[in-house]
Image (tube, grey):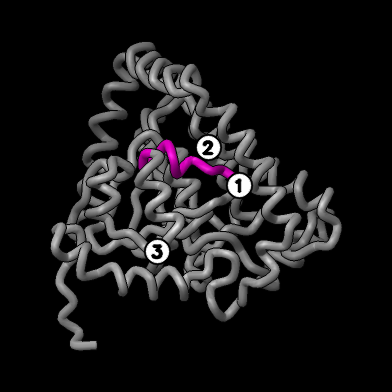
Amino acid sequence: MEFGHITYQPGKVARIIFNRPKVLNAQGYQLLEEVDQAFGLAASDGGCGAIVLSGAGRAFCAGHDLGTEEHLRHCEAHGFAKPNDPDLRRKVADMYDFYVKKTLAWRNCPKPTVAMVHGYCIYAGWMLAAAMDVVFAAEDALFLPGMVEYFSAPWDLGPRKAKEILLEHRFITAAEAFACGFVNRTFPADRLEAETLAYAERVADNTLSAPAWTGTIKAAINHMEDGMGFTSAIEAAYTSFCLMYGLGAHSSARPEGGGFARTDVARRNFARSRPWLERQGLCEPDTSGE
């Protein structure tokens, strides 16, 4: 199978790599369709014991595609709603399929999954990382959670911490994400790939030697979360997201300011919170002199 927006590398540790580095791996519908196909290939491959999700270039994923020519052409060709499409009914249906239904399916992939995050992990990037079983990150990675279609942030960070970060709207460092329990392990950027793949190899060995053991562990933990209401909360939060969208929350977002993710605001608020983060050991001291 040929892919245009991802690279798929089958094997004991299958790799799914976002491959739109020029736009920091922004998620268009084509990319997400290909990610879904790749997860299906890996899940059905008897020689695959683990899956690593990562991004090519400078970032894991900078969020949703805000309207590149590639994305607009794909939407036009396949009848999908375009960004800011006035047909909200079609827009809501498309977003549910791509950002809720598919993401829940990847969360429940029968093979163990690992997100390998470097650079930026913004909004829709957070969603894909959150759907994986384990998240490893470069020490200099920056994360931006938000009120998005797959709203897992309260589960990923805890309710009170999620309120603190989302209400202020700021980037968080890999160290802070680790302290909150969203990131499992952090590594120097030049060691991230080797350490992640080594871990995935060990997990794959376990899966291939005792698939019922690892499969049961993953399913039982997901079922525990679902018993606490995870999937129903994700579904309900999507309704809230659609209400926010319908009320025009996206309309005031400037493309030059980062669009709906408002990365300019998140960056400014991160800078304002930096002294506190440094005192807590959650951020390296700023030596730029700015």
Percent from the top left, x then y, of residue 256? 57, 80
| Residue 246 falls in image quadrant | bottom right
Say which of 18 and 61 sits in front.
61
Q: Is 247 rendered above or below residue 230?
A: below
Tell me which amino acid carries mark 3.
Arg
Marks 1/2 in contact by CB < 8 Å: the verdict is: no
Say which of 30 and 26 sits in front.
26
Q: Is 79 rendered above or below residue 113?
A: below
Residue 150 is a magenta residue: yes
Q: Is 33 rendered above or below residue 207?
A: below
Disc 3 versus disc 1: nearer the observer? 3
| Residue 290 falls in image quadrant | bottom left
Q: Going 37% across and 43% down the picture, which residue do you hit?
A: 160
Residue hosting label 1: 149
Image quadrant occupied by the N terminus: top right
- Dot 1 falls on a residue whose secondary structure is loop
Farthest-out residue, bottom = 290
**Highlighted magenta segment, given as a residue range:** 149-158
Disc 2 versus disc 3: nearer the observer? 3
Residue hosting label 2: 39
Residue hosting label 3: 170
Disc 1 versus disc 2: nearer the observer? 1
Camera sees residue 51: no
